[in-house]
Amino acid sequence: MKYDLVITGGKLVIPNVGVVEGDVGVKDGKIVAIGRSLDLNQAENVIKANNLLVTPGIVDAHYHIGIYRPLRDDAYSESRAAITGGVTTIISYFRTGRYYLNTSGPYLKIFPEVLKMVDGAFYTDYAFHLAPIMSIHLDEMEILAKEYGVTSFKYWRIYSGTTLRGEYRRGRMEEEFLLSDISYDLGLLYEIMYRVSKLREYGARVSFHAEEPELIGRFVRIARQALAEGRVKPLEAYHLSRPPETEALAIAEAMYLAKFTDCPVNILHISSALGFKEAIRLRDALNVDAALEVTLHHLTLTIDSPAQVRAKVNPPIRTKDDVEALWRYVREGKADMIGSDSAALKSSMKDKDLWEAEAGFAGASLFLPILYTEGFIKREIPLERLLTLATINPAKIYGLWPKKGSLNIGADADIVVFDPNIEKEVKPEILNSAQDFTPFEGMILKGWPLYVLVRGSMVMDKGEIVGKPTGKYIKRPVWRWGD
C-alpha cells in the first residue's frame, strides 16, 4: 500500500489500552495502517518519531469561540492556540443574548450566518453547541439536530436571575442579559430536557452549568465584606461567593430532572470535591446517563495562585484539596471528560475590581502539557487513561465517534506527535492565542507537541504552526446505528 505519510519509530498512546511501539500510515486524510515497520519506501512523507509519543488529536468539547472577541478573528487565533496544545477538534458554545454576536432571534436564521462567518477560519475541525434561550428555540431543536447536526444543547443554571456580579435579581436576566421572551428557570430546563429526550436517534444531550443562583446572591454579600476587610484574597473571595454547596445543589437539580425526563446530561466543569462526590452519588442512585467533566484550570489552579483576579472564572477556582480530589476522580475513572473551557479575552477586561472583571480565560494551548506534567509525571496517572478523557470519551459523548478521538484504522488522521522531554515555562507569547496574559504563567510544563495533523494535513511542523486554516464543520452525529 502507498501512503501519503508514515509516522515511524514512535510509541503509540492508545486510549483505554496502553502504550505500544508502532508505525501509523496515513492516506487521503485517514489512518489506513497501524503496525510495526511499515514500508517507508511506499510513503511520500515520513515523520521519524524516535523517542517521541504519538497520540490521537485531543477533542476539546468545551470552548467559547467569539464570546469576547469577533467571531471569525477568534476562530482563527484560538484554533491556533488549540493546535499548540494538541487539540485537533473543537466544539464551541454559541448562544443568543449578550456577548457572542449580541443578537437575539431564531437559530435557524442566526446559526447559518455563524457558520458562514467562521468558514475558512479554523485550523482545527469544529462543531457547535447551542443554548435554547427563547421560546422559538425550543421548536427549532429537532431541525437543528436533523439539518445542522447540532446535538448538544446547553443550560446555564447560573443565568436564572443572577447578574454578572452575582446578585440575585429575579426576572431581570431575561431582559438585561439573555434578551429572552421566557423565564429562564428550572421549568425551561425541564422543557429542554424533555425535548432532547425525544431526539435519541441523534444522540442528543443537555450540557449543564451547575451553580445555584439564589444562594449565590446571599454568599456574594458575605464574600464582598470579607474581601473589603482584607480577610481574604480575591480568588478566595470569589470561591466563597459561589461555594461548592451551590454547585452540589445545582447538580442535584439537573440529575433529578434528567431522571424525570429520561434525558442524557453532561455536568460541565465540576470544580469541587463536594460537587463531584454528589454527582457520582446521584448518578449511581438515580441510574442517570450523566457524563462528568473537569477542566484544565480546576485541575491546576488554586485560590492561592498568583494570578488572582486574572484567574476569575465560573465556577470559581477552588482549594488545593479540591484540586487533588478532582485528580483522584480522574485516576479512579469517575470523571468522563476533560475540557479547557477556553474563552480568550484581553487583560484590560481582567485588571479591575474582582466583581467587575470578566470571568474566564484561554487555556487550550496547555492541554497536552498539563495532562502530561500534572497528570502523568506529578500524579502518576497512566497516560492512556488521561488521553481517554480527552479523546475517545468526548468523541463518543458528543457524536464524533468513530471519526475523531482515536488511532483506529478508518478514523480521521488527527494525530499529535509530542516530545515528553521538551520543557517550557508558560508565558503568553508561546501560546499562539490572542489573549495577552495567562493565569498559568510561570508554570513549568513538559510534553509539547512537535507535529500535529488534522485529517492528514500538517498544521504544526517541528513546533511551528504552518499553512492556512483548513478546518471543517462537523455535522453530528457522524455515525448512527443503521447507517
Image (cartoon, rainbow, N blue to C red):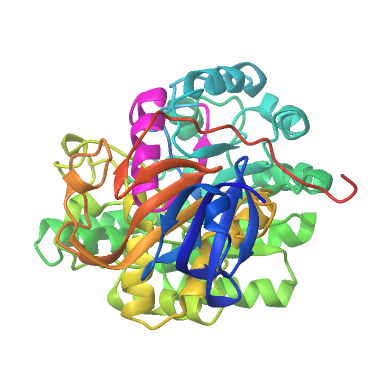
**From this viewpoint, is residue 92 visible?**
yes
Residue 69 lies, with reference to residue 246, above or below; the image says above
Residue 115 lies, with reference to residue 397, above or below; the image says above
Q: Residue at x 55, y 77 (%)?
A: 18
Q: Residue at x 78, y 32 (%)?
A: 146
Residue 284 sits in which quadrant?
bottom right
Residue 185 sits in which quadrant?
top right
**Residue 383 in the figure: left or right of residue 193:** left
Magenta region, residue range: 68-96
Q: Position of residue 400 (x, y in %)?
A: 66, 48
**Residue 220 in the figure: left or right of residue 268:** left
Taking depth in this image into account, of 401 and 185 the one nearest to the observer is 401
Taking depth in this image into account, of 182 and 148 the one nearest to the observer is 148
Residue 476 lies, with reference to residue 72, above or below; the image says below
Taking depth in this image into account, of 371 and 64 the one nearest to the observer is 371
For the C terminus, the quadrant is: top right
Residue 25 sits in which quadrant?
bottom right
Q: Would residue 324 be counted in the magenta stretch?
A: no
Q: Position of residue 220 (x, y in %)?
A: 30, 54
Q: Position of residue 69 (x, y in %)?
A: 33, 28
